[in-house]
Amino acid sequence: MKVTLKDGESFESRTSLGIVEKMKGASMFTEFKTAEAYMEMVVRNAWRFFGVGLDVSGKTESERAQSLINELVRKELARKERK
């Protein structure tokens, strides 16, 4: 799958967690060492900078990553393409 953020930056991976890991790796916010901490920061910043609340849920890190990607797409902060 390929996810392109509103700013035009694109990430490709076979899984949502892979996308989140690549987004984390490209982030200027390097203090976030885990995917979980990075996802929490994305949720906070979506509200802080765009006034958009993201409802991210799931029992596992993979489920939460999938939920985050779906929310970014639903709130038009990203678009998703299947490869």
Image (cartoon, rainbow, N blue to C red):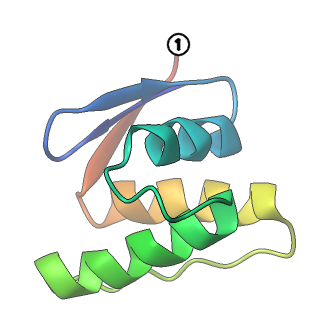
Residue at 37% from the left image edge and 48% from the top image edge: 27
Task: Specify the quadrant of the image occupied by residue 60.
Answer: bottom right
Q: Amino acid at mark 1?
A: Lys
Tell me the quadrant of the picture where the N terminus can be found: top right
Q: Residue furthest right?
A: 59
62 lies left or right of 78: right
Quick check: 4 above or below 63? above
58 lies left or right of 53: right
Residue at 53% from the left image edge and 63% from the top image edge: 68
Residue at 14% from the left image edge and 77% from the top image edge: 50
- Residue 13, how many percent across, how many down? 60, 24
Quick check: 21 above or below 83? below
Residue at 44% from the left image edge and 66% from the top image edge: 71
- Residue 39, how many percent across, how many down? 54, 67
Quick check: 20 above or below 56? above
Mark 1 burial class by Cα count in 10 Å: few <14, some 14-19, many 20+: few
31 lies left or right of 62: left
- Residue 6, how many percent across, how many down? 17, 47
Q: Residue furthest front?
A: 31
Quick check: 30 above or below 44? above
Q: Decide which of 74, 38 is in the foreground and name it.
A: 38
Task: Specify the quadrant of the image occupied by residue 53.
Answer: bottom left
The residue that label 1 is drawn on is 83
Query: Helix, strand, or loop for circle 1?
Result: loop
Task: Specify the quadrant of the image occupied by residue 59.
Answer: bottom right
Q: Decide which of 31, 52 is in the foreground and name it.
A: 31
* Number of numbered discs overlaid on the protein picture: 1
